[in-house]
Amino acid sequence: MTASDRVVAEGMRLDAEALGGKPTSLWRTTVRRLFQRRSAVVGLTILGILVATAILAPVIAPFEPDQVLIGIEEGAKIRSAPCIHLLGCPKDRPEHILGLDGNVRDFFSRIIFGSRFSLIVGFTTVGFAIVIGTTLGALAGYLGGWLDDAIMRVMDVLLAFPSLLLAIAIVSVLGPGLINALLAIGIVTIPAYARVMRASVLSVKETSFVAASKALGAGTARILLVSVLPNAVTPLIVLGTLEVASAILSAAALSFLGLGAQPPTPEWGSMLSTERNQVFTSPHLVFFPGLAITLTVLGFNLLGDGLRDALDPRLGRGTKVEVV
Amino acid sequence: MLQYTIRRLLSSIPVLFGILLVTFAIARMIPGDPCRAILGEKATEEVCERFIRDRGLDRPIYVQFGIYMQDVLQGDFGDSLRFSRPVSLILVERLPMTIELSLAALTLAVIVGIPLGILSAMKHNTPTDVVTMVGANIGVSMPVFWLGLMLAYLFALVLKGTPLWLPPSGRLTAGISSVPFYEVYGWGVDPETGTFKLLHFFSNLYVFNSIITANWKVLGDTLKHLILPSVALSTIPMAIIARMTRSSLLEVLGREYIRAAKAKGVPYRTVIMKHALRNALLPVVTIIGLSLGSLLGGAVLTETIFGLSGVGRALFEAISARDYPIIQAFTLVVAFGYVMVNLVVDLSYTLLDPRVRLQ
C-alpha cells in the first residue's frame, strides 16, 4: 500500500465512521441485494445452467455436433421431427429429443454445443469494447482539450449509425466470419463505454482525493487506475452485462445474414439461418435455436437489471427504477 | 428557439461530415478491384487505366473525397454497378417500403407500449405489473428474425384456411398491383426530372398511394401484408417503451405535486392521465427517437425474412455484391435520417416541456 492509498483508505474509514456505521464491503451489500431480487435470481439460474451446459457439453450431448448419422444409426432420416420415447414416440424410432437437421445431425447435441459460442461471443466482444472504450473515455475525460473533442466526435459519428447496419458494413470490409463479426460488434459498442467512463472521470476529476494523489506525485496512469476507475466500475458492470445480451443478439443476426459464424459451426444464429427455408416443413429446426438465443439473452438482461438495482445505493428497497 | 435550432443544426455538421467520411472510407476499403467489379473480369489493362482516370481514381485520396462530397451535395450518388441505373432512382423505389414498415412498427410499439407501461405502473407490484414486465423482458430478448419466422409459421401455415390467415411474404398479393397516383390522375411527368423522383417516392408509399387514389382493395391488401413484419419489428421498441413509461411514471408518482393533487381530491385516473403522464412521457419521447436505430437495423432482418425489397435488404444485397455507390448512398441516407430524427426529438422537448431551457 502506498502513501496515497493510505490517505484514501483513511478518508474512507473516517467517512464511514461519520455516517455512524461499520465500513461494509460494497460487494457484500451488492450480492445480498442481488439475491433479494427475483428477476436477478432467475437470470442467474438461467446463466448458471448455460455455463454448466457449455462446460459439460461433451458429457451432456449424446452425439458429436458435426456427426452425420446416416449409416451410423438405423432409421435416421433427414430433418426428422423430435422423438422422445417417454412422450409416446414409437420405440422402433431412434430417440432424438430435438430431432435431426438437414445434414442428419443430432439437433440437440448441436444446440448444446452452441451454448459455448454464445458465451464466447458475449464475453469477448464486451471485453474488447470495455478495454478500448474505457481507455478512450478516460483519456478524453482526464486530459480534456482537443483530444477530448477528437475522441468524442469520433464516438458521435459511430453512434450516428444504427448499430447493426454499422456492424454489417464493418464485416463487409473485414470479410465474413465469426472473428470478424465479433470485432465488428465490439467496435460498434465502444462509444457506450467511452461515454460512461468519460462521465465518471469528469465527475471525480476535481475531487480532493484526486488532488491528494496528484500532490503525492502519482502519475496519470496511476490516478486513472487507482482513483478514477473504481468510481466507474458500477455503471460499467451494469452496462457490460446488458451489452452481453445485445452482443449475443447482434452476433446471431450477423450469422443469420451469413456474415458471422459459417456452417457447420454449431452456432445458433447460423443453424437457424441454414434451416430457415424449412420453417414450414420442419419448424423445430428454426424454433429451438431461436428459443436458445432468447433464453440466453433473457438471462443476461435479467441479471443486468438486477445488478443495476443492487449496485445503485440511491435506491431503497421497493422503489425499483429502471433506466433503459 | 430559432437560435437553438440553428445552433443544433450547425453542431450536427461535424457528425454529418464524419458520416460522409466513414461511408467514403468503407466503400474504398471493401476488398476488390472497382474496375473489374464494374466492367467485368475480362476488362483489359488499357480499358481499366482509362476507367480509373475517368473516375478520378488515380488522384490523391483527398481529391477523391472532394469529388465525392461535391457529388453528394448535388444529390448525385452515381449509378448502381449491378443495375446500371441511378442510385437515387433505386433509393426512391426502396426507401418508401422501409419507411412504411418502420412507421407501422413504431406506431404499434407506441400505442401498445405506452398503455402497458401505464397499466404496469398503476398496478405496481401486483401480478399485472409482474406479467407485463416479464413480457417486456422476453420482448427485448427475442431475435427479430426468429420471431418473424415463427409468426410466419403460425399465421401463414397453422392458421391457413381460417380468417386469421396472413400472407408470409411480399408487399402485395400476386395479381394486385398499385398504380401510381400520377398515372391514375393522368399527369404526364418526364421520368428524367427531380419532380418525377419525388412523385415516384410518394407513389411507392402504398398506403398513402392507395388512400389518395381511393383504391381500397390495394389498401386492404397492403395492410394485410404489413401486419406480420411490423409486429415482428415492433416487439423490441414496444418492450423498451413499456419499461421506460413504467419507470418514468413511477418516479413522477413519488413527487410532491402528485401527493398534493391526490390530497385535494382529484380522482386517481385524472392524477395519472393529466398530472403525472405529462412529465413522465418526456423520457419516453427520447427513447422513441433512439429506438429508430434498432428499427432500421431490424428492418434488414425483417425485410429479408418477409421478402420485402426495402432499403435494409437492398443495402445488405449491395454489400454482398460490392455495389459501392448503393452502399455509400444508402448508409448515408440511413445515418442522416437517424441524426435528423434525434435532432427533431431534442427540439420537440421545448414544445413538450416549457421548463427545458435550451442553452
Image (cartoon, coloured by chain):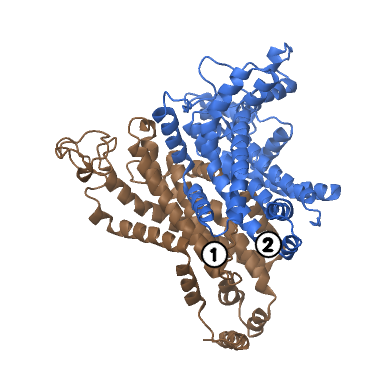
Chain colours: A brown, B blue
Q: Position of residue B296 (x, y in %)?
A: 58, 40
Q: Is residue A128 visible?
A: no
Q: Which residue is the site of mark 1? A: A308
User: How far is mark 1 from mark 2, CA to CA?
Assistant: 28 Å
Q: Are the residues flagged by discs 1 and 2 in contact, CB closer than 8 Å? A: no
Front residue of A197 and B145: B145
Q: Position of residue B217 (x, y in %)?
A: 59, 18
Residue B202 to residue B257: above or below: above
Indicate the quadrant where residue A52 lies. Answer: bottom left
Residue B309 to residue B180: above or below: below
Furthest toward the front, the residue is: B265
How many discs mark residues in the rendered view? 2
- Going by the image, does A304 lie left or right of A272? right
Q: Which mark is residue A148?
A: 2
Query: Hey, what amino acid is under mark 1?
Result: Arg
Q: Residue at x 47, y 23 (%)?
A: B42
Mark 2 secondary-structure assignment: helix
